Amino acid sequence: MSLYKRLHEQQGPAATGLPSRRDPVLDELRQRIHHHLIDELGPILYDKRLSEDDLRRRVHEQLQSALAQERTPLTAADKAQLIQDVSDDILGYGPIDRLLKEEAVTEIMVNGPDSVYVERSGRIEKDTASFVDETHLRRIIDKIVGQVGRRIDESTPMVDARLPDGSRVNAVIHPLAIGGPFLTIRKFSTDPLQIDDLIRFGTLNAQSARFLQACVVGRLNIIVSGGTGTGKTTTLNVLSSFIPSDERIVTVEDAKELQMHQDHVLSLEARPPNIEGRGQVTIRDLVKNCLRMRPDRIVVGECRAGEALDMLQAMNTGHDGSITTIHSNSPRDTLSRIETMTLMAGFDLPIRAIREQMASALDLVVHLSRLRDGTRRITHITEVQGMEGDVITLQDIFMFDYSMGVDDKGRFRGHLKATGVRPKFAEKLADLGIRLGAEVFQPEPMGQKAVGR
């Protein structure tokens, strides 16, 4: 049981500042005051000239005034909670506003008005937050998607969006969401993670970090692969931080998530069709267009379909050093998925031609997994060596050592270890003046301190 749950059970619902179940009288009063504030403040709420502090002050003044006119008897605690709830609705994102501000929360999953789950430290647990009803939840969803110019209605019941801080948002409403609406928010840290953070978390070690930095600086084409929620975008962010600041970078994403620190970065974002079903701009359209923008590097947030072909073409036509992410279960599966997605481009290409393109274009696959203990680890760093017959040959340069077992808390003891194989592209890096000493590829004995296995 998590510390959060234990504290909640010991101290009661009041310790979290949220009621254990909703009071219909308070909910009705809250709705009435909310609508009153919207009527009174109107356009002021969307006035960009007002600072956040000024807007918050005006909302609180109107709240106090509206409460003073109410005859419903309220305790001091109920009054404070009511002010907080209405403020969160108008200025923030309602009941989930406090979760968005909580550093330990990495994902928020709203499974309907009365069911909110969060991910803390890689573990999913139920939270006490709840919405008044479906209309309340729908209003918060409309607010989120409206901020980035997206829409959600019966004709478009699914939407991908983002919060101003870059957090990824997915919403599904009726008629697709039975018992919904459903809202999923993957939070992004306000302070983007750096390579030192990943080393500290155990995602990789200093030896493999040095190797990956050399690969990015040496303009190798890299695929970051893994399942959902394994940390692919975070790893892509960290790898892109190694790109030299004097290079022109073009990023292509469904919803902007990458947080580049370089000065010369151009960000492109896909656009869904409008209400008439027109005006859609796909990832594939953007990848094609960015080839005309004189990029030194192309960074694609994720390849899901036919854009994989355009990405391979770019990597094979002088745009070395490109990086993208792909959903897959292993490095070998990554190549199979790219093969399938290339066929989705609509061209009747021979399988061998596709594989030859892949073998020529790709240099490295960095594969991540979310382990049973909730941690996200790089489990494979694999070189794409070339073709042998009709098969693309792969060679693991670093592998996660599962044989080291787990500790008393169920956390994996293992880490990335060099396999002892020196990659073929080490000579290419050396030609560019990037020399990796033999110690980088020095193998460690596998399975040392194997405990609890």
Image: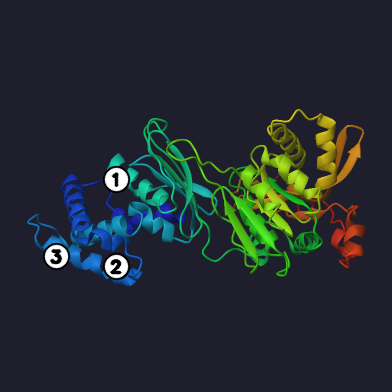
* Point 52% across, 46% down: residue: 271
Tell me the amino acid under the disc marked 3.
Ser
Q: Nearer the viewer, mark 2 or mark 3?
A: 2
Query: Disc 2 to disc 3, how far (Cα)?
Result: 15 Å
Q: Which mark is drawn over residue 55?
A: 2
Q: Secondary structure at mark 2?
A: helix
According to the picture, the residue beneath numbered tag 1 turns out to be 136
Q: Secondary structure at mark 1?
A: helix
* Point 17% across, 65% down: residue: 64
Query: Disc 1 to disc 3, how far (Cα)?
Result: 23 Å
Q: Secondary structure at mark 3?
A: helix
* Point 65% across, 37% down: residue: 305
Tell me the amino acid under the disc marked 2.
Leu
Q: Earlier in the sequence, mark 1 or mark 3?
A: 3
Q: Is residue 274 above or below residue 86?
A: above
- Residue 355, image x, y percentages: 82, 36
Report crowding for label 2: few under 14, some 14 to 19, many 20 or more residues within 10 A (C-alpha). Answer: some
Tell me the amino acid under the disc marked 1.
His
According to the picture, the residue beneath numbered tag 3 turns out to be 65
Report crowding for label 1: few under 14, some 14 to 19, many 20 or more residues within 10 A (C-alpha). Answer: some
Q: In this view of the protein, can residue 179 be seen by the observer?
A: yes
Horizontal side of residue 119 vs 409, given as left or right:
left
Question: How many marks overall?
Answer: 3
Q: Which mark is drawn over residue 361?
A: none
Q: Nearer the viewer, residue 397 or 134?
A: 134
Horizontal side of residue 242 vs 167, given as left or right:
right
Colouring convention used in this rendered image of the protein: rainbow
Q: Earlier in the sequence, mark 2 or mark 1?
A: 2
- Residue 348, image x, y percentages: 76, 28
